Image (cartoon, coloured by chain):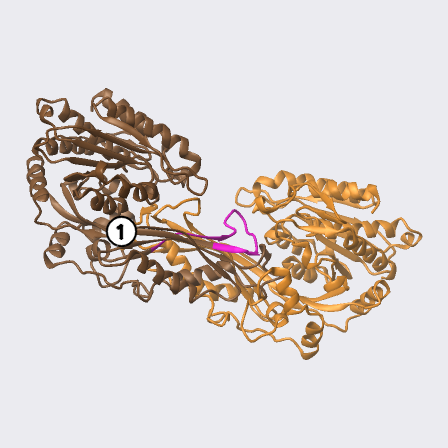
Chain colours: A orange, B brown
Amino acid sequence: MEDSVRSEYFELLKFRSVGADPSHLRDCSDCAVWLKKWLEALGFEAELRMPDVKDGVAAPPIVFASRKGDEGRPVVLVYGHYDVQPVDPVADWNTPPFEPSEIDGRVYCRGAQDDKGQSFAFLCGLRDYLSSPEGAKAPAIKVVLEGQEESGSGALMSLAPSWRKDLAADVLAVCDTSAAAGLRPAIVAGLRGVSHFTVRLTGPNRDLHSGEYGGIAPNPAQAIAELVASLHNADGSIAVAGFRDGIEPPTEPERRAAEAGAMSEAAYADDIGCEPVGGQMGKTIVQRNSFEPTIEINGIHSGYGGPGSKTVIPSGAIAKISMRLVPGQSVRGAFEAVRAHLEDRVPRGMKLFVEDYNPGAGGFRLPLASPVFRLASSVLEDMDPRGPVFQWDGASIPVISVIREVSGAAPLIVGWGQTEDRIHSPNESYSLVQFAKAREWARRLFEAL
Amino acid sequence: MEDSVRSEYFELLKFRSVGADPSHLRDCSDCAVWLKKWLEALGFEAELRMPDVKDGVAAPPIVFASRKGDEGRPVVLVYGHYDVQPVDPVADWNTPPFEPSEIDGRVYCRGAQDDKGQSFAFLCGLRDYLSSPEGAKAPAIKVVLEGQEESGSGALMSLAPSWRKDLAADVLAVCDTSAAAGLRPAIVAGLRGVSHFTVRLTGPNRDLHSGEYGGIAPNPAQAIAELVASLHNADGSIAVAGFRDGIEPPTEPERRAAEAGAMSEAAYADDIGCEPVGGQMGKTIVQRNSFEPTIEINGIHSGYGGPGSKTVIPSGAIAKISMRLVPGQSVRGAFEAVRAHLEDRVPRGMKLFVEDYNPGAGGFRLPLASPVFRLASSVLEDMDPRGPVFQWDGASIPVISVIREVSGAAPLIVGWGQTEDRIHSPNESYSLVQFAKAREWARRLFEAL
């Protein structure tokens, strides 16, 4: 990597752009301004679009940029996000979370990969293309970089429908996913949707002495545990009535292609450090991650957790819950099914509140035999003789569902992540090799389109 | 209250003597030194006994003081503790937790009641007695003030057996409990025991992206919930096989006396702000709190709990659990029953660790028809025409079981707490009226003994 590109990359990573945390709003704005200037230097007309202030909290700005081009060629819309996940538990980081540290060919930093690293590498490839002779005949290009992807893309998803003309395009290029094992190219042919919400229980009006009140006061820590436990059956299947309504099972070609690109159980066990036994017993890892929905407890908190002991009955409890949704499931229907399940089981003495619901978007699968997939496949074969695998990613980019509908563009979701990148975890990283792949992919893609 | 006593009381409260937290060890030592000097001023020979350093962590010192007296009279051993509960959640305090604030006749401060306030008021009554004419014929008096009661009295409980001669006494006076409603005097005729421990689950080697790994990795937040939920049945009874082995039910006179002194369900609902539906359905509040054991979840923690969302599968989870034990239960047996229950249910893909076990002590009940209870009853009748009620307290003072055995003394446990004191909770307080009662009780007791 040239020093000039490295220093740009590191500048970008240093912005503490935690989009979900209002205290980092300024860091997000600074990051957006930096990206706007960077795109203007590439001949884009760029602007920051400020979402409306919601609940008194302003959201990170959206970078929108466009560049005229050869009218005979397909219009390309590039989507990425510059916001990153929170960094806690901070103590588990080996290097400062927002201090890019290059060690043995990997750059360690929150956002090194997801998605500052991947989207910036893609944009660097676009710059390579534009500054090459072929760049003279470049197609019209639009770029949208948002700051809320990790927390549901609220602003962009609500604004996009009013930007139909701005976003209109033929191809929607996204570099925010993973390649297959061994960095074999992968085309994402489907994504799960995601929604999340918070469950709060209130019981006693204060933390109580567990001796004076033990046997008298109901215990919210026990209650939240019972409520959370009720969401799944003993075999790991989801116990919520109506949650699975409408699910469209994958086609045989989709199932075969998905299993073909799958990592082995042993490889997963080695990666996560425990048996890969999440989800429903009796289904394959690919089925459970690509084609099945989940209800995942992202956090559960009640009472004392510090050193020593504190013999209290806590006054309340929370659980942070997210759902991954698959094609055919109704986003609202799945949420209402879970809410009804919880409201039917409010523990004795407790008040239940379901809060901060973010509907996100549903899952989708794309037709395997589309022109854009054929073109992408040949480009990726040129890059890697193994050719691409098709993946149905267990993760979600809810905003893609919306932009796809509004723009009319065919999604082309190709990313270069690897499991060792540890996105969303402490010590997130991205290798210079992966960066180069993403960059080369963008250049070749624009040449071929 | 005289200004001189008030300023002593406030000085004592300002020590941040959180005995369970090693970072407050120095505060505990300073508090112990203060108490030692205070007792020396009363003519006691006083010393600080330093527990052995355990696991590299020194424990708060134990204040031991003794004073010769009339050999014809019963030797009195006074027990109290100067350590206090942690103060979190700090945000819920209306005044600084360690800044005594006198508002409408109540002193707000951590430890204002439990037990700095109650034991200091008792010692002030002792001082009143010693400085009175009757004081000239004072009995021999011993005082033990420890700094670990809130976290299990580890040091004193291990050292007491080697202090048999020092602790030998006829009466063991303790002022660390509550009076009945309306400040009616109450004699504690029984206490539950308490043990506590921490359950830790480890799953993935890091927090994981809930999309990339959802359906693949097992979820410790879900797992700890299932484990905790398994401890109780739907009717609130304990689901752990063998946990109740050996329980000695109360006698009819004990049951009648306990129910007679009981607060109403409505009064409890008003106090705790929710229905008093803890414990097993179909049993009275007195049965559930005085004569039944509990397994209480003092805390449960896993994953994200901050603002916004963080869609992770957490890498681990903990639950802090305490048990209240009743006479007949084996302390070790009850713990082993719970451990076996947990180890039989280790969730798939998880490792289970049961840590920081503190056995504490078992529960006990004292004979109602003892000479010391008769004497105490007549003193309390002189103080309050309603006379005393007998209580079987749901709380625990594990060390009392040990000191009682070592000293050979008859426990006389009379305290002046009220539910509105909110001990162990934010905004703990003690009224000047309660302080005066505890002080008068001590003076009259020493006169009568």
Q: Residue furthest top?
A: B4
- The front one of B217 and B40 is B40
Question: Is residue A70 left or right of A209 when viewed as pictured?
Answer: right
B153 or B238, which lies in front? B153
Q: Quarter of the image for the C terminus of chain A: give it.
A: bottom right
Position in image of residue A404 (x %, y %): 70, 61
- Judge whether residue A404 is colored magenta: no
Q: Is residue A403 above or below residue B369?
A: below
Q: Which residues are magenta?
A: B296-317
- Please give the residue where the numbered disc 1 appears in the rendered image: B193
Q: In this view of the protein, which residue sits in the foreground, A30 or A177?
A: A177
Identity, as a three-letter code, of the amino acid under mark 1: Gly
Determine the secondary structure under disc 1: strand
Please say whether residue A95 is visible from this viewpoint. yes
**Is A306 left, or right, of B244 in this rendering?**
right
In this rendering, the count of numbered labels is 1
Q: Give the percent coordinates (x, y) of residue A430.
A: 72, 51
